[in-house]
Amino acid sequence: ALTAGIVGLPNVGKSTLFNAITKAGAESANYPFCTIDPNVGIVEVPDHRLDKLTELVQPKKTVPTAFEFTDIAGIVKGASKGEGLGNKFLSHIRQVDAICQVVRCFADDNITHVSGKVDPIADIEVINLELILADLETVDKRLARVQKMAKQKDKEAVFEYDILVKLKEVLEAEQPARTVEFSEEQMKLVKQLHLLTSKPVLYVANVSEDEIADPSDNEYVQKVREFAKEDNAEVIVVCAKIESEIAELDDEEKAMFLQELGIEESGLDQLIRATYSLLGLATYFTAGVQEVRAWTFREGMKAPQCAGVIHSDFERGFIRAETVSYADLVEAGTMGAAKEAGKVRLEGKEYLVKDGDVIHFRFNV
Ligand code: GDP
């Protein structure tokens, strides 16, 4: 399963946020594909479409979909040189598929900041630089190997050599690898390098309790937004402390609390949703009287692969996918009405499943 890593300097609120995630978190028993690990928190993906489908179908049970966050503690300056837990930290980042970088945007004199003052951009740059330096090492190592062969005009080696030189140039300019545009063919090679800075990133601005309702006055948040824009990255504003309180409430209490705070959606829910799409994940639904359920697939997956998310037998014996879009189903009101209106399609092996599809798989056992 794909997972997003939570990173950040010490004392920015990572543990507080991760606590909120595990407290709000889903039972791993419902999600057998998920890892059981104290550093992994399973979150359910909030999705109003699932509520609507439940209303329409009135099933016995409704199950949201879920994915994982991994808590990656311990980055310090010098990590790429193996200082502190540095190497371990970097190897943990290597295993995640996207990065949520928590930055401190709250002033609180009682809480020490590692570099003495609150300066979110400096913090981001410390972390990004460590990742860039680690990648530079990876690229240099590979370059040393490929260079010789490239000199002998080995075609594949020349192809790779050009990519590596480009990456080196960008990394040396202290820019992440994800800023380089590669062709699809080149991208295949780049992926094999498992670079840390080619992973997609979003920034989590952690603000204080009294600023969460209206963070627009927080100059740190503004700076993070400007920075993120350059990086093509999204910014989610949370108050980790409040999120960990919200996580203890039931749905009704939560709604009331948010209303009191003047917030429409909790920061954590926003974070979950943003991270889900950062990971390239999307949702399709199954809607039977027994169970209405959301399922996660990777964007670009075809119908049989998506069937395989439910069970490998579904993929192996795939015949077709009876598919209706969420919007069409809601408009028709019932599956029967959607069929009559000709909105239910019979899709085959090559069908690219779309976010929001409601599917009934037909398969051979
Ligand atoms: P980590 O080292 O990044 O994991 O940071 P922690 O989550 O342990 O937080 C460091 C300190 O900052 C703790 O004392 C937290 O209670 C405090 N803290 C975290 N988030 C917030 C917040 O949103 N507001 C305030 N005022 N304090 C926070």
Image (cartoon, grey):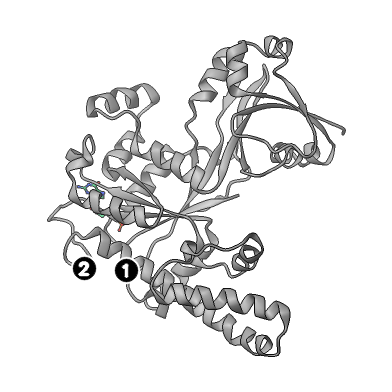
Disc 2 secondary structure class: loop
Q: Is residue 267 above or below residue 13?
A: above
Number of numbered markers:
2
Q: Report x, y in % for residue 299.
A: 61, 43
Q: Is residue 53 above or below residue 64?
A: above
- Res. 92 in view: no
Task: Residue type at mark 2: give it.
Answer: Ser
Q: Residues within 10 Å of mark 1 (few under 14, many from 20)?
A: some
**Residue at horizontal 14 percent and vertical 55 percent from the top:** 110
- Quadrant for the C terminus in the image: top right
- Res. 161 in view: yes
Extreme right residue here?
364
Disc 1 secondary structure class: helix
Q: Report x, y in % for residue 356.
A: 59, 29
Numbered circle sitting on residue 21: none
Q: Which residue is mark 1?
A: 126
**Residue at horizontal 42 percent and vertical 77 percent from the top:** 172
